[in-house]
Image (spheres, rainbow, N blue to C red):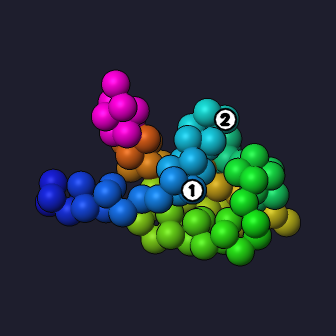
Amino acid sequence: MEDYWFHVLENLNAEELGVLRILLENDAIAKIKSMSNPQLQEECCLSESRYRTTISRLNAMKFIEVTAGTKEHTVFINSYGRKAVYHFKDESL
């Protein structure tokens, strides 16, 4: 299982890792603290299509959670996403 984890991490691109870092830096770690899609997209500086692709991939990898129920969907990083960010942080030291 550990091999699978490292395979998934190796396939993260810079945009995906950037989104994860932004969520973590903004303390969007729970549903109640989640960021709205427009706010997150603005901070990421990605085009709408790149943003949607990135969010879809991160959601499929289970690194983020997208919440509905309000006018705007919101996004937060979960424990797997935080683990991925910490992995790259430790690797760069």
Mark 1 residue element: helix
Is 6 placed above or below 56 here? above
Tag 1: Cα neighbours inside 10 Å, few (<14), some, or many (≥20)? some
Is residue 64 in view? no
Please report the bounds of the magenta region as a residue range. Answer: 86-93
Q: Position of residue 71 (x, y in %)?
A: 85, 66
Is 42 placed above or below 82 here? below
Name the residue: 81% across, 63% down: 72
Q: Main secondary structure of the magenta part?
A: helix
Q: Quadrant of the N terminus?
A: bottom left
Q: Is residue 12 shown left or right of residue 19?
A: left
Mark 2 residue element: loop
Check residue 1 for magenta coloring: no
Residue type at tag 2: Asn
Name the residue: 58% across, 66% down: 54
Which residue was labeled with disc 1? 15
Q: Position of residue 52 (x, y in %)?
A: 66, 71
In terms of depth relative to the viewer, which is nearer, 39 or 10? 10
Q: Is residue 36 shown left or right of residue 26?
A: right
Residue type at tag 1: Glu
Instruction: Give the quarter of the image for residue 93.
Output: top left
Which residue was labeled with disc 2? 26
Is residue 51 in view? yes
In terms of depth relative to the viewer, which is nearer, 63 or 50? 50
Q: Is residue 58 shown left or right of residue 46?
A: left
Q: Nearer the viewer, mark 2 or mark 1?
A: 1
Name the residue: 64% across, 55% down: 75
User: What numbered label is drawn on residue 1?
Assistant: none
Name the residue: 80% across, 52% down: 42
Check residue 90 for magenta coloring: yes
Q: Position of residue 84 (x, y in %)?
A: 38, 46
Q: Position of residue 19 (x, y in %)?
A: 59, 51
